[in-house]
Image (tube, coloured by chain):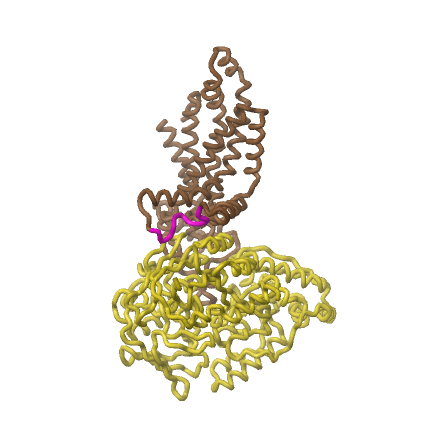
Chain colours: A yellow, B brown
Amino acid sequence: MPKRVLLGLLLACGLAAPALAQEPKTGGVINAVIQPEPPGLMLAQVQNGPTQMVSGNIFEGLLRYSPKLEPQPELAESWSVSEDAKTYTFKLRKGVTWHDGKPFTAADVLFSIEMLKQTHARARTNLAQVDKVEAPDDHTVVFTLKQPFGPFLGIFEVGSMPMVPKHLYEGTDWKTNAYNNAPIGTGPFMFREWQKGSFIRLVKNPNYYEKGKPYLDEIYWQIIPDAAARSVAYETGKVDVLPGGSVENFDVPRLSKLKDTCVTGAGWEFFSPLAWLWLNNRQGPLADKRVRQAIMFAIDRDFAKDVIWNGLGKVATGPSASTIKYYTDDVKKYPYDPAKAKALLKEAGYKGEKIRLLPLAYGETWQRWGEAVKQNLQDVGMTIETIATDVAGGNQKIGDWDYDIAFTYLYQYGDPALGVGRNYISSNIAKGQVFNNVEGYSNPEIDKLFADGAVATPDSKRKEIYEKAQKILVEDVPVAWMLELQFPTITRCKVKNLITTGIGVNDGFKDAWLDK
Amino acid sequence: MLSFISQRVLKGVIVLLAIVVLNFFLIRLAPGDPAIVMAGEAGASDQVFVKQLREKFGLDKPLPEQLFIYVKGVVSLDLGFSFRQQAPVAKLIGERLPATLLLTLTAFAISLMLGIVFGTFAARFAGTFLDTAITVFALIFYAMPIFWVALMGILLFSVTMDWLPSFGYETVGANLTGFSHAVDVAKHLIMPAMTLGLFFMATYTRMTRASMLEVKRLDFVKTARAKGLGDAVIQRRHVLRNALLPVVTLAGVHSGTLIGGAVITETVFAWPGIGRLMYDALLQRDYNLLLGVFVICSAMVLIFNLITDLVYRLVDPRIEFAS
């Protein structure tokens, strides 16, 4: 059996599964890698990946999500939805305290929402449908929506809506508040120390509301900027956890074979990272749908999955990842077919005009992928010029629409209304910004479908709308979808229950324990 | 001598201000917008958010006004605020500077000391096997890129032999104090300092060798021999001392290059210094932080050069300070 298939099977089976049957043990310290070093830990103000990975232990949201993206209690112990799907009532847990001992109440929820609307771009968008938020008592919060909003129960995980202590932030300058650098949350671990450039230390919250949890005494997040050095740190036993994306993909098979090492691809269901090529629909040959379709046929995406990503991930079929709601694979198919690509290019009248390709400056794996795609496209007769740039330079070019083809990958946040539509609706065409509709695709039918899909009821209606949208988009190829990415988490096998939700290591280590 | 130093300091301040202005514009010439980088990291890029960030950074103001605000800050010893790191730039640099000074000064001392010793031996035994061996090794170290030496060092001394730690400044979580902490830091320091120092050691070896061979041929050495002085005394007092002048010059010039090398060394070995801080700030277009690091590095280079000038005088008393 090829090694990568074996690795894939191991990932699919989830090596951590047998641990579920064991009785958790208390105590111990985990050393995990964090990369890059987070700019800050105040999750309500800094929303990048590393910040959430560390602060997901300190702060909490009202809900968390299972691998199937079903809502689970966190700071809210229960919730109910009115018949007209416009009123959501959350009952908060009683007896929850902030790390400084003050009680957590509905007033904190109301304050957090007001703060997030100003500091958290995604939360602001997610809350756009909220008409008002009220707290009838200390442990009840009622959201009233302007109209039904299908994905509403999907916006409450810690990274999307972290709860902030009102008593420490109200009436202060939020951006310079001293607690930004020594954050106070309600989570299972408390911030203790941050030696910039070296490590971040979190310690167990002894007053955590879930009795017996967390099991670990401490977490050290080690900051190691070089990918090869991170692999060595694991090999030499200095760290126990390599969260997804910590090491280059070509190191994954080697590290997976080390003694007492477990690997899992679980924990990315909520984010569902999807990689694609932005195609500049505005100008040159790529303005022609047939050329864009030719690109889909020309690229060997199985090769990219099997060789560049070591068998990890899945070839994408369209704008939605297969892990999120309303996904369908009943769409036009684009198998690797260079002959068909050549025919389409000929039909479109492509005469070898130069196409600029912008790879993603995220390390060796992405560089190799850029080279492979360039070769694929050259094989069908396209003239490709690779533009070298760093991340900031690349983002500027993409935001200014100064590119032809550009690599990217984006999170989908579990629902097409939250993470898919933003890249295809024409109201999101805005020069100078990235991660919106930078390809310049404009289709009134798609605009309407995404607008309707967000507010439609019941669920079956949403399903129908999003399936139709997927079909249209896959036919039009506004961007070239590549892979549903999988970032394997590598751990010592003694680390149990590290990943228990669809948010994975970004959701905190409250269930994790060490089998010493 | 005092007037020489005060003049040099004054000139240094003017040079520093010129560097600040030049860097201010150079950084902004590079494509990339800090607000877009931060918006990208947040996974969202709506107009309100980007506008908010630009206002926070002060990037919405005209460029001359931004420059005026920055220079005014630097003159009053305020290096500004890093919005990405949410902390004053001076604080961020202050946290990292000791580690970089420890690394670069150790590397500098090792390279200078060993370079001069090996160079002296090579010159003393010129044309012998020892000379050839030293020259060949110096050439190899001179030619090897720092990152490669670093990775090979990790592979050999950390992975294979398990003698030295592969990353960091100290053993995290060990809570060592006093002498055992110093030993722990020293263990972590060996590989980065050697990696950074090897290139410079090779340079000083070659320079010392060449310079000593040249001085050896001069008349005053013959005179010393004619006086009946012993070989060791001639080599040490007459040849080496005169031969060191170009080495000292080179060492002064290298003070800036060492910081450049520290960027790579600190990245590979996860050494928490300003080299890495600068690298991260560059990638994130954290303008204030990047400019702050540049100011500190430039000041360090100016100080090193002043020290070099003073050392000249110690090495060769014939040199006088021009006022």
Q: How many marks?
A: 0
Would you identify the image quadrant in which residue A183 lies? Answer: bottom left
Q: Quadrant of residue B145?
A: top right
Camera-side residue: A502 or B287? Answer: A502
Decide which of A432, A59 is in the foreground and name it: A59
Which secondary structure class fits the magenta region best? loop
Q: Is residue A378 left or right of residue B135?
A: right
Give the answer, above or below, for where B272 lies relative to B109.
below
State which quarter of the image contains the C terminus of chain A: bottom left
- Residue A162 in picture, x, y percent from top left: 37, 69
Residue, x 60% and y 56% (percent of image)? A387
Note whether B306 is above or below B234 in the view shown.
below
Q: Is residue B53 visible?
A: yes
Compared with residue A42, is residue B223 higher up or lower down, i.e. above or below? above
Q: Which residues are magenta?
A: B164-174
Q: Residue furthest top?
A: B227
x then y, percent, for residue A281: 61, 69
Quadrant where the image shows the N terminus of chain A: bottom right
Q: Nearer the viewer, residue A188 or B322?
A: A188
Instruction: Name the residue: 48% across, 23% down.
Output: B240
Check residue A130 for magenta coloring.
no
